[in-house]
Each structure stands twice: as structure tokens, then as C-alpha cells.
Amino acid sequence: MVIDKLQNAVEELQEKFLTRQRSIKENLQALETKIQALQEVIDSNRQMLVEAELSGDVSTVEKVKAKIGELKEDQNELKEQQEAYEQVRSRGDYAADLKKIRELAKQALQEKSKNIKQAGEELRTIQEDLERLTNQKNELENKLSWMIRVDTVENVLERIEEMIDPRSRMLDSIKKRKFWQHFLEGKSFNELFPQPEPLGPNV
């Protein structure tokens, strides 16, 4: 995906920037150390100059003054270099990297827009399918419920129940089911009805 390429490009630029900043910081610290070291030498030579002036040692005075001048020149050069590092601290040649990132960002946005549109279309399709299937489910549930409740075989046959055997009115629901089972199988209904007890011999 383009977003992965963009992420990599940004990370590479960040690493390049941080590496540059670390290098600048290290160089500034090194320059500051050198400047401070030179300052200590300058201070030491100033003390020597004072002592030479107090003792009237003209030759030493001239030599020390010349030495201090050289040290200050070296120190000023280091300070100028230090200022140059400070000026470029927030700058860097990142034009090519930023151009690459800009192009990748545009592509990533286009890819995101395309993916969102595609996902939206797929979602709408699924929602339509789900709605259609839900309607079919409801229709089948209603049909099944109707088939269970209304116009069952027994309900239809009940219209001719008395024609088949008037005794069926005496049956409970359990025996009524057996009644219709017997009817469908062509069996006799006699076992479903209590049989009259045989009469005893006449006395």
C-alpha cells in the first residue's frame, strides 16, 4: 500500500534529520570545549603578561602579547564556526525527500479515497442482500406459522369427521390424532372407543 511507502519515507527523513542534529550538537560541543580550553590558555598568558610588565621584561611582554593575539584569533575562528553551525541547525537539504513525501502523500490520499468508496459500495451491497434475505426469512416464517396454524390436514378432514364416524366427537385430542392416523392407514376405529361390556346370562 502507498501509505506504507509514505510511512517509510517519513521515517527515513526523520532519521536523516535526527542524525544531522546529533552531528551538529556533537560538533558544537567539541567547538565549545576548544573555545573554553583556549580561553584558559589566554587567561594564563594574560597573567604572564601582567607579571612581565610588572618586572619590566619588555621582550617577554611582546612575546606574550603576540601569543595572546594568536590565541584570540584561533578562538574567534572557532566562535565563527560555532555561529555557522547554529545558523544551519534548523536548515538542511531535504528538498528531494520532501518532494518524494509530498507525492506519496497525494497517492496515499487517492488510495484512501478509492478504498473508502469501494468499502462503502461493498457495505451497501451487503446491506441490500441482508435486507432481501431478512424479508425472505420473515416471509418464510410467516408462511410456516400460517401453515402450522391454518388449514392443517386435520382441520380440513374435520369437515367430514361425523360422516366418517359420528363417535369421533367423544375423543380427546390425543385419541383424535390417532383417529385420523387410523383413517389415513385404513384401520378400524373400534379400538379408540370404549366397548360395551358383554351382558351376563339371563337369570
Image (spheres, rainbow, N blue to C red):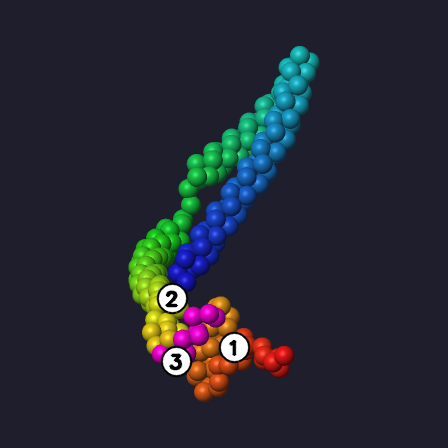
Q: In which quarter of the image is residue 92?
A: top left
Q: Badges 1 and 2: C-beta atoms under 8 Å apart?
A: no
Position of residue 142 in the picture relative to residue 89 (left or right) = left
Residue drawn at 60 percent across, 80 percent down: 202
Which residue has dot 1 on it? 192
Looking at marks 3 and 2 on the same chain, the residue that comes earlier in the sequence is marked by 2
Assess disc 3: are there few (<14), some (14-19) or many (≥20) residues with their C-alpha within 10 Å of its C-alpha.
few
The segment highlighted magenta reads 163-171
Looking at the rendered image, the quarter that the C terminus falls into is bottom right
Residue extending furthest front?
203
Looking at this view, name the residue that lies furthest to the bottom. 186
Report, in whole angstroms, how far the alpha carbon at label 1 lies from the one at label 2: 26 Å
Whole-percent x, y for residue 83 in the image: 47, 33
Based on the picture, tell me whether residue 119 belongs to the magenta stretch. Answer: no
Could you tell me which residue is drawn at 32 percent across and 59 percent down? 120
Q: In which quarter of the image is the N terminus?
A: bottom left
Quote the CA–CA distance across marks 3 and 2: 24 Å
Percent across and percent down for residue 103 are: 33, 56
Magenta segment main secondary structure: helix
Quadrant of the rendered structure where residue 88 is? Answer: top left
Q: Residue at left 36%, top 79%?
A: 163
Give the label on residue 164, or none.
Answer: 3
- SS category of the residue bearing label 1: helix
Whole-number angstrom distance, CA of label 1 to CA of label 3: 14 Å
Tag in front: 1 or 2:
1
Residue 134 in the image: state x and y as whole percent. Answer: 35, 63
Secondary structure under badge 3? helix
Q: Which numbered disc, 3 or 2, marks the residue closer to the eye?
A: 3
Query: Is any atom of residue 32 visible in this view?
Result: yes
State the residue position of label 2: 149
Any part of residue 63 in sight: no
